[in-house]
Image: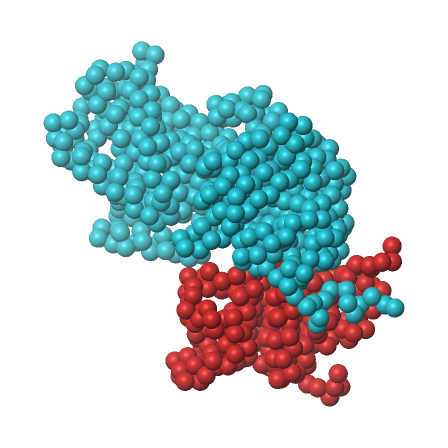
Chain colours: A red, B cyan
Amino acid sequence: MNASASPILFVSDLRVSYGRIEAVRGVTLTVNKGEFIGVIGSNGAGKTSMLRAIAGVLRPAGGSVAFEGADTTGAKSHQMVARGLAMVPEGRMVFADQTVRDNLVLGAYSRVASDPKGVEEDIEKTLDLFPRLKERIAQQAGTLSGGEQQMLAIARGLLSRPRLLVIDELSLGLAPKILDMLFPVLTDLNRQGLSILLVEQMASYALAVTHRTYVMENGRVLFDGASADLAGDDRVLDAYLGRRGKH
Amino acid sequence: MKQKSWAGWAALFLLAAGIAIFPWVGDFIGQRFPTSYELRLVMRAMILAIVVIGLNLLVGLAGLVSLGQAALYGLGAHVAALLSLRAGFSFAESMVFAIAIPAVMGAILAFPTVRVRGVYLAVVTIAFGLIFVNILREWVGFTGGASGLANLPRPTMFGERLMATRAQSFNYYYLILVCLLIAVWVQYAIANSRYGRAMRAAAQSENAARALGVNVVGIRTLAFAVSAGFAGLGGGLFANLALFVNYETFTFTASVELLLMVILGGSGTMAGPLVGTSVLFTATQFLQGLGQWQTFGYGFLLALVLFVMPKGIVGSLAALRARMMATSRARETGHWPNGEPNFLNNQNGQGDGTGSALIAKGVTLRFGGLTAVNAVDMALKPGTVHALIGPNGAGKSSLLNVISGFYPATEGEVTVFGHRIKNDPPYRLARLGVARSFQNTELFGQMTVLENVLVGAHTHFHASFAETVLRLPRFGREERTSRNDALRLLDFVGLSDFADEEARNLPFGHQRRLEIARALALRPKLLLLDEPAAGLTHAEIEDLIRLIRRLADHGMTVILVEHHVDMIMAVSDRVTVLDYGEVIAEGSPAEIQENPKVIEAYFGHGAPASPNAAQVPA
């Protein structure tokens, strides 16, 4: 990575707790402009909680979040969207009883009144990324297959014109063929300048597409490094990839 | 947990002692206190509390909002009044009917829940209340209309008059107190039993409750009947206290007030009805001095309390306490499964003569013009793991829904362990030994992890409702055994540390495991798992593989819908591949992996991000 790159997201000593549980205990993480970052770790490691605190869905219990140099700790999710951070939530959460088009328009909620033409153009551009959605544009989102819903969730996120896209668990419940279709789209978006922070259980996928990866355990960052290096790292192989063929 | 319930009982004891001493306070301080008016106020408050406890069972546990409860309260009052005025029934006799008739009415009111819930059910109960009051007002010959039924005979019991003099009215006061304590006990006894758990389960995830063998209509009928029985008890006590009843006490406004008492106190909590009734009843008395500002003050107070304490007084205090006790600890778990699932082995799937756990013949499922499952044939040997794979939208989950009874097949037939499924509801299939998990997890989010597993054991309780309320030995025995089994199951799936956590607070992957533990509590012969590995890491998937293998080794038959190819290859005995609702291939995992049709439809090219491509070091 470029050493002079400036961070688009800087998370410092972040802590999140809810109910009786402290889920994130002091996480420090950086996403530089133009980077594709992965976060892997077991269930309960605190990945989703961390993302929610970054995106303003949860209020952190401590630490700080800075987006494009401005302190956004404790900002609300709609404020984060306005600042240029979009989140694709775990389990997709499309608006099931509205059409694909209406879901997309809702993604541009913050600017659709002031710039209806721009939104229309963006919808067209986004649909070019996902031709399957184009075929289903008038269908209710709830009738889409799981893979199509995930495409819609990503497309909807893109319509707020984010500079950082945060994705929670892209692969959840998706067939291998769909994943082979989705990951290249993310890589393309990243090459066009979009920074991406991806939380993913399927470590093998995350390590194959991202630049750097953070490995979380027990609410903390265990270690991080270039994804290509981590893919051969013994610690990652044992815990997250399964050391195939060795024993 | 232990300490908390101890504190609750202590508080209840103090409250009961306070109420018991209240009539005698004047003797200690040498004044004429309480006056008979004040004594009556306390009696009316206690009667309302009985009705509110009943409503709390319905709203707080079963999640069914009734805005017609005052009509059931009024039904009890009018039954008691009419029977003692017109039929010469004794106090005790008329009270029996004052409870029983509203209870039957409540059971009838439960019928609409088969079709409607939420706000729609609330509208049905409003309609019931309006009709009831209208009948009371217009059927003058029977109910007296606006002049009501007056001059009821004063109640007597065991030849003792309960109400005539001040000293005798103490008798009635204590009778009401005893009824209130019984109501508190019954509420506690139901809430802490399979009945209460099933009510909460049906409210939080109806599908999961049905899949675990809960007869949802039955349990809602029970909730309505018990709730109405308490309303009737309160009504009968009220009629014999006031010695006059007419419709004005039981209007829609009264129903709203009863519901407000439940919500203000904390819906679903044990102490909530007592607190809510006390606060609102007291507030009403004080606000009477405000003249035309009374209603304004009442509304303002309600809005203020619920804004500060959105879960009601007791509910919000409990949440605050839970937050203060927040402890820092690991949310990850070690490897699982732990031990062998021997304790599940009171029935195994083998040797029922047919040689097949499941046979599907020409199963077809259509929604309107869409064919989700098309002429599927399958046969499963007992004790095997059978994977069902295919692209998203291929009909895998639809097929699971047919097998578990959620959708009746449009054509074809399914036979499970020799029993042919024909319009059997899910709860009956659960009782035949079919358990399932759900693709998007359907846990009872606001119940603890342990309670979730206990709902899974619902069909293994045999203590009757009476045995449960009276806490007879069989109830205690079953409760202890089930708790032990549930804890062993949690240990088996590695979630022991989370037993007292609310299920919704678990990380997603743990929720999947909890769903499996809950399904196992049913002690199923056939287990259907819908994408159990979604959201799990590689290490966790390996744990899951071991778990499924161990279950199959103990004779359980497993149907597995999954996308993780490595897992399917490692765990399955047979694989069926669906595409567009049709079987495109069937065979051993090795055969399936080589099948060009499957590669085309399902695996894709696997080039850029094929798992285990780039990572294995040379």
Image coords of residue B89 (percent x, y):
25, 16
Quarter of the rendering occupied by the N terminus of chain B: top right
Residue B399 rendering spot, x and y as whole percentages: 54, 47
Tell me if residue B618 can be seen: yes
Seen from this angle, which residue lies furthest top? B159
Q: Nearer the viewer, residue B278 or B446?
A: B446
Query: Quadrant of residue B49 in the image?
Result: top left
Spot occupied by residue B31 in the image (x, y as percentages of width and height): 35, 31
Q: Compared to B466, does B310 lie above or below?
A: below
Q: Quadrant of the C terminus of chain B?
A: bottom right
Of B596 and A27, nearer the camera is B596
Image point 69% across, 67% down: which residue? B606
- The answer to whether residue B98 is left or right of residue B597 is left
Residue A93 showing in the rendered view: no
Q: Is residue B508 above or below residue A27?
A: above
Q: Quadrant of residue B41?
A: top left
* Residue beneath the point at 55% across and 52% down: B582
Q: How many marks?
A: 0
Q: Which residue is rendered at x = 68% and y = 80% of the image?
A: A35
Location of residue A174 in the rendering, given as x and y in whole percent from the top left corner: 61, 61
User: Along the horizontal axis of the image, is B386 left or right of B48?
Assistant: right
Residue furthest out toward the bottom:
A4
Quarter of the image holding residue B602? bottom right
The residue shown at (51%, 50%) is: B374
Foreground residue among B492 and B435: B435
